Image (cartoon, grey):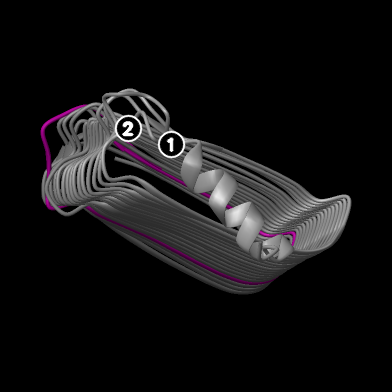
Amino acid sequence: MKTLTPIAAAMLAVLSANTFADNNRAILFQVGGGNMATTDQSDGTVHDNLIVQAQTGTSNDSDASQITGTYNSVTTHVQLGESNSITSYQLNNTSLSRISVYQTGSMNLTFLNQAETTASSILINQTGSMNMAFTDQSMATLSNAVSNQIGFMNIGVIGQIETIGSSALVNQVGSMNTATLGQSESTASSALINQLGDTNLSVLGQNGTTAAIAIVNQAGFMNSAGVDQSDVIASSALVNQIGSMNVADIEQENVTALSFAAINQAGEMNEADIEQDGAIANAAIINQAGSMNEAFIGQEDEPILSVAVINQLGEMNEADIDYDGGVVLSAAFINQAGEMNEAFIEQDDAIASAAIINQAGSMNDADIEQEGGPVVASIAFINQIGEMNEAEILQQDGTALSAANINQAGSMNMAEITQTSTTLSLASTTQLGGSNMHTTTQTGTGQTAIVVQIGSGNMGMITQ
């Protein structure tokens, strides 16, 4: 009697174990020692499936199950190295779906689950050691999840629940990076996390989104990024981090119609936060280059067609833009270059308003507030060049067609403009030199005030 080779015997054993099911196939290749492979397609409701398991090395473990109504699906496990482990399930009437795992190295761990999915796929690629990948797709249709890991001790987690035509991708190169990506009740949405370096953390979630995109790119070490989009339509969120210990957070909820949020950070220990709630066709952008800069943009309730941009270059600058209420067609810009500059803009219940702050130097402080409503076609503009300058503009209570402008060049200048219940008013203050002070107050209609101070130690006050 002819003796079977070890490979042929293993294949025969696997094929023989599935005689209870209909037209299922299983193929097993093992080279080395101490490898363990388990295949389960024995459920009578399972048919027309394929499992392929290939292991080269020592002490590898491969467990593949296709059960409870799964049909026309494929599972592939490929392991090269030592002490790698793969566990995968396709179950609960999963059809036309695929699981593929490729591991090269040692002590890599993968756990995969597809339940009630149709025409969906999971792909895991791991190269290195002690990487971990966990992916779960449930009640998904035409959805894809991919995780690529190169290095050691990286952790990638992907979950897609009740998604249609959506995709999730995690790429990790380096060590001890952690990426968590979740999509729930999303349609035609995409989520991507790229990590290059060490100990980077990224958390990305999309819930109830349609045609939404979320992307996180991290290069360096100890960067942290969070993106949360909920009930979002045709909107996108982007985070780019280069350097170390940067923190970025984007949250968009109940956002519809082409809204965009982006954070770009280059340097160390920068912090940026964007919140958009109930926005329509809005844009929020934060750019930071340097170290220890802080920026916040909040557009809440029902802002429509609003733009907020913060640019920071240097160290320890702080910027804050806050829209609240029914803002329509408003724009706010903050540009800071230098050290320890502070800027604040708030537009509340404003319509067609613009507020701009430009600061170059160190320890300058600027504050713009446009409140009340309806504010129509109002502009507030601050320019500061030098050190320790202070500027404040306030336009509120139904301001219409008003413009307030402060320009300061030098050091320790202080200027303040207040316009309340004004119409067709203009207040402009220009100070060149040092230690100048001026205050302009206007309440009424058709007011105009222009002030120019050149030199040092000048003081002035206008009240109308």
Examine the rendering and report whether any part of residue 152 can be seen. Answer: yes
Depth check, front residue: 246 or 366? 246
Secondary structure at numbered mark 1:
loop
Magenta span includes 384: yes
Depth check, front residue: 6 or 433? 6
Q: Which residues are magenta?
A: 369-395
Classed neighbour count for the residue bearing mark 2: other residues with Cα under 10 Å, few (<14), some (14–19), many (≥20): some
Depth check, front residue: 157 or 347? 157
Examine the rendering and report whether any part of residue 112 can be seen. Answer: no
Depth check, front residue: 202 or 400? 202
Horizontal relation, residue 450 to residue 382: left or right = left
Magenta span includes 455: no
Give the CA separation, mark 2 to mark 1.
6 Å
With respect to residue 454, does 111 lie above or below?
above
**Amino acid type assigned to the residue bearing label 2 in the image:** Ala
x, y percent for residue 408: 57, 69
Q: Quadrant of the C terminus?
A: top left
**Amino acid type assigned to the residue bearing label 1 in the image:** Asn
Q: Magenta part mainly helix, strand or loop?
A: strand
Residue at mark 1: 18
Residue at mark 2: 21
CB atoms at circles 2 and 1 under 8 Å apart?
A: yes
**Residue placed at 88% from the left, 50% from the top?**
34
Horizontal relation, residue 193 to residue 246: left or right = left
Classed neighbour count for the residue bearing mark 1: other residues with Cα under 10 Å, few (<14), some (14–19), many (≥20): many
**Residue placed at 66% from the left, 66% from the top?**
2
Horizontal relation, residue 123 to residue 327: left or right = right
Residue farthest along the front direction in this orientation = 1
x, y percent for residue 454: 59, 76
Secondary structure at numbered mark 2:
loop
